[in-house]
Image (cartoon, helix red, strand yellow):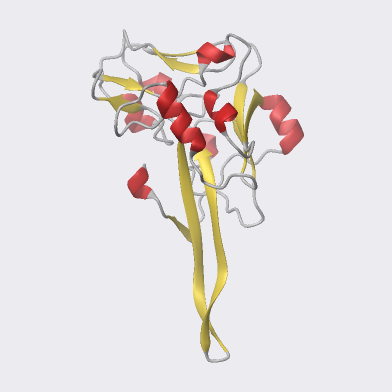
Amino acid sequence: MAKQLAFYVDMNACTGCKACQVACKSKNNLPDGVRWRRVLQYEGGEWIEQNGQMVPSNVFTYFVSTACMHCENPICMTVCPTAAITKRSDGIVLINQDLCIGCRYCSWACPYGACQFNDELGVMSKCTMCVDLIDKGERPICVEACPYRALDIGTLEELKAKYGNFIAPAPLPDPSITGPAVVYSPTNKTKSFGDTSGQMKNIEEL
């Protein structure tokens, strides 16, 4: 198999502007309620008494740009009863909508919520890593749209060698479930998966 392609996210540069999310939705003409790329907002902290006043303590907030992780072990592919989900030699995971029956098994299995039902088509859909652009030697639209250059793409091996092995900021799930093909550069406040000190602040947007 060719080297696994992966996304890179610089959390120090991401401001939560959602330009990546908008660009993805526009390029792929996605209907209401379907977002292949999403930007999560995670924050926490507490108020403590200091000199007779209540002041914030351990306050943090950060954004996690996420999409289909094109996992090394895609559980969505494992559970699909019609073999509609396949993994290319470069690691990109795709849904063949001609074979999809819309059973939503992939949606229930994916810990990232990447597989989403398209009501207009009656089938599942998800990020394709802009495979049409990749095949032309170009980069995904989300990467190109980011005004702060917080997103990039490369082989998982190269990205880990350059940026490290941090792949699961909270509130993302345990990466051992599927082996996500992604690398994050954390901020100095970023928590790891399993953290319970913070909470999602934009659930209604997802």
Q: Residue at x 47, y 42 (%)?
A: 39
Q: Position of residue 32 (x, y in %)?
A: 29, 32
Q: Residue at x 53, y 44 (%)?
A: 64
Camera-side residue: 126 or 99? 126
Q: Residue at x 56, y 61 (%)?
A: 60
Camera-side residue: 83 or 128? 128
Which residue is most to the bottom? 52
Q: Residue at x 56, y 46 (%)?
A: 169
Q: Position of residue 204 (x, y in %)?
A: 33, 48
- Looking at the rendered image, the quarter that the N terminus falls into is top right
User: Is residue 180 in view?
Assistant: no
Q: Say whether residue 181 is left or right of residue 116.
A: right
- Looking at the rendered image, the quarter that the C terminus falls into is top left
Q: Quadrant of residue 51?
A: bottom right
Q: Quadrant of residue 89?
A: top right
Q: With respect to residue 7, does 99 lie above or below? A: above
Q: How many numbered marks, from 0 up?
A: 0
Q: Position of residue 44 (x, y in %)?
A: 50, 62
Q: With respect to residue 168, does 98 lie above or below? A: above
Q: Quadrant of residue 162?
A: top right
Q: Position of residue 194 (x, y in %)?
A: 50, 51
Which residue is most to the right? 162
Camera-side residue: 33 or 58? 33
Camera-side residue: 133 or 78? 133
User: Is residue 175 in view?
Assistant: yes
